[in-house]
Image (cartoon, rainbow, N blue to C red):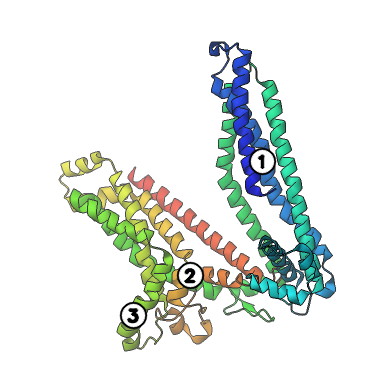
Amino acid sequence: MPTTWLILAIAALAALGFVAGRARAMTSAGGDARRLHSLPAYYGWNVALTVLTPALGLFVLWMLVQPFLVDRHVTGLIPDSAIGQGSSRGLVMSDVRRVAEGLSVLEARGADADDIAAMTPEALQDEMAAVGVALGTPMTPAVKAAAEAYRAETDGWRTWMGVAVLAAALGGLALSWRMTDKDFRARNTVERGILFMLLGAALVAILTTLGIVLSMLFETANFFEAYPWQKFFLGTNWAPDFRGNSELAILPLLWGTLYISLIALLVAVPIGLFAAIYLSEYATKRVRTLAKPAIEILAGIPTIVYGLFALITVGPMLRDWLAQPLGFGNSSSSVMTAGLVMGIMLIPFVSSLSDDIINAVPQSLRDGSYGLGATQSETIKQVIVPAALPGIVGAILLAASRAIGETMIVVLGAGAAAAQFNQGLGEVVNPFQAMTTITVKIVSQLTGDTDFSSPETLVAFALGLTLFVITLGLNVLALWIVRRYREQYE
């Protein structure tokens, strides 16, 4: 059964349960709603939620577990002889999944299943290419057989899933409908169920964060089993090679990330903070009405547009006006290009949040400062900004996290080459030198047909975990600064 039909069937059963539960409650009360323990709608909602909760819970669980079970079974069907030199079981399994998807596309376009089964691997690969399915390795009879088994097993699991989910929905409908009576405490049951739903929603973010961290930890552990951690953290060269003998040191990427982020913050923080102070303390209502939305428009521009702006306008301008005349280089892709454009992108993050927190400072603090004879500038410097410091630090932290995680602007504005420590300190600190960041290399290492057992691919997870630790450190540092200044000014 298609997934859409299954969800619609569950929704229809829930709607039917709502009507049937409400009607049964009214019937048990002789049509007099005053004899019911709860309002009539609660009885309907009790039945509807009892239909939806087990059915959707089983559906989500099934969708999470099924791919692992199918992959594990089909992977065992691939003989070792089908794995060529330079390939791996993971890469072959990727082709199996692509072929299985291609078979579904061919049948959806009217191809006969028997004709497809009779095709040779070479002919089937040509058909796959015709429908846009590209394979990383030439198709073999083993890959074709595994793809057919993968598709058949997936269809079988999907059929059983439909049966199980509908059975759970019907079971919930029958059970809750039978329990419905005028004395049944429907309101208490429904509110308790909604409470658990809200608790589950609150746990989603926590469990998602935990899942992200654990997934990176496990893959990072696999990476350090294949590559020494000393070379990763202490090495000075980034030169991945999927044929072997890779140098996967993080220091060149970390330096590029911090260097570009620092320039971006040097641009965004002063401009954004001064703009926030002007809009909240000096600007007239008319100016504020026009200027604030104009600044916030910057936050809505896609990062790819900023990247194109860096590539076409800012990069050549910096090269022609500064880099070449000063003898710093001839490339339009540089740390300064990406940093300036990223800083422009971050201005609304600092400005809007700082403006909101400054406006939230109580007017009584301003009045007290003016009453003591302070000028407006002295009040802003000595009263308002210290009082708003926690929010300002939060805005700067948000901007820093956004800068560290940016990818598109770096690709188009700073290039994809890692910093070369062997070229000397002058080249490493040259702001007009092309560099790249951790996020760019995470994308590049996971792009295309990758073998998830090779260190060249697993290094992406180690890079991601390092980035996570850096962001966590920024949060801890910001919390320490906020607590210190709160103690001083409260």
> Quick check: 157 above or below 124?
above
Q: Position of residue 1 (x, y in %)?
A: 70, 48
> Quick check: 390 above or below 321?
above
Q: In the rendered structure, find residue 318 and report the number of the disc placed on it.
A: 3
Q: Earlier in the sequence, mark 3 or mark 2?
A: 2
Badge nearest the viewer, 1 or 3: 1
Quarter where residue 327 is shown = bottom left
Residue at 58% x, 64% y: name it: 464
Q: Position of residue 396 (x, y in %)?
A: 39, 57
Badge nearest the viewer, 1 or 2: 1
Residue beneath label 1, please?
57
Q: In the rendered structure, find residue 450 and report the number of the disc placed on it.
A: none
Q: CA distance from mark 3 to mark 2?
A: 20 Å
Q: CA distance from mark 1 to mark 2?
A: 41 Å
- CB within 8 Å, label 3 to label 2: no
Q: Is residue 179 left or right of residue 43?
A: right
Q: Is residue 198 left or right of residue 111?
A: left
Badge nearest the viewer, 3 or 2: 3
